[in-house]
Amino acid sequence: MKIFLHSLWRRFVESEFALSITFHALLLAGLVVSVSITPPQQLTMDMTPLTEQMPVINATFIDPAVTQAKFDEARAREQQVLREQRDAAKRKADAERKKREVAAKRLADKRAAEKKKQQEQDQAQREQRELERKAQEAIAKKDAQAKKVEAERVEKLKRDAEVQAKRDKQQRELEEQLAQEQAQIEAQETQRVMSEKQRYSVLIKSTIQRNLITNEAFKGKKCQLNIRLGIGGVVLKVDKIAGDEALCRAAISAVYKPSQLPVSRDPKVFAQLRDINLTVEQ
């Protein structure tokens, strides 16, 4: 409001209307001053008859040159005052303007600084949020990768366990099958060997029986012998186990009589014939 009133006053001072008013005011002031410096007239009472009295008129003459000079001087002083007022008002307005400009600049700088600070804070917050987002993404990615690796590991262990279980089952089945086949083969082989052993035992016994001396005293008697054979059926040793003494002597002689007894060339069968027990009877 103060600035507005000052502006109105400045416009009024600088207008032609104000100059006209100032001029007339100065002229009036000059006239008043001229009248005021004229010495006052003494009034006297004349007692003569009215008809005898002559009117006396006293007037003060004002030199127009003096009045104009005073007016010009007053106007010059007024113009000087107006100029000084205008200059002062201008300086004050300039000062006010500069003050406003400085204040506006400070405010603008402050707002710019605050805006820059806010922008920097916003940027820092955005960068922090971005870093946090990236960190969360990295953690999530790492967790997902770890879960994936763990799931793959578990799945691999499961597959390996299934494969191993299948292999173990197949191995057991194969081993069982092989065991069964081996048992069957061994049973068959044992049966064959025992069969061959029995056959060759019968042959050995028949050979001994053929070489045994016939004696009526041996009828109904028995002799149990242990015979140990070497390679090719060579008799290594013969021992009496039990039985009739005479029959056992005759049987031992019958065992040693051939150069060799019949044996199998099969090592397994021969191993069963190396040490055999036979019962000789007549």
Image (tube, grey):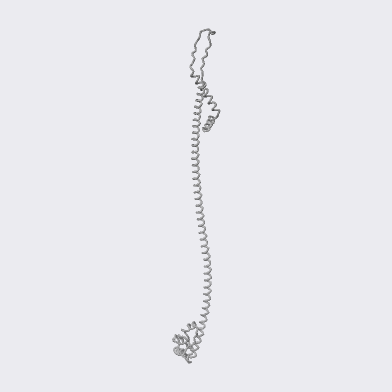
Please state the horizontal and vertical placement of residue 108, each as a whole percent of the image. 50, 41
Q: Is residue 231 above or below residue 51?
A: below
Please state the horizontal and vertical placement of residue 81, each as a whole percent of the image. 49, 28
Residue with the most extreme front position: 65
Q: In the image shown, does 39 or 246 lie closer to the viewer?
A: 39
Please state the horizontal and vertical placement of residue 252, each as a whole percent of the image. 45, 89
Q: Is residue 168 above or below residue 68?
A: below
Q: In the image shown, does 55 or 146 lie closer to the viewer?
A: 55
Q: In the image shown, does 136 or 241 lie closer to the viewer?
A: 136
Residue with the most extreme right position: 17
Please state the horizontal and vertical placement of residue 56, each as a whole percent of the image. 52, 12
Q: In the image shown, does 82 or 150 lie closer to the viewer?
A: 82
The mark total stands at 0
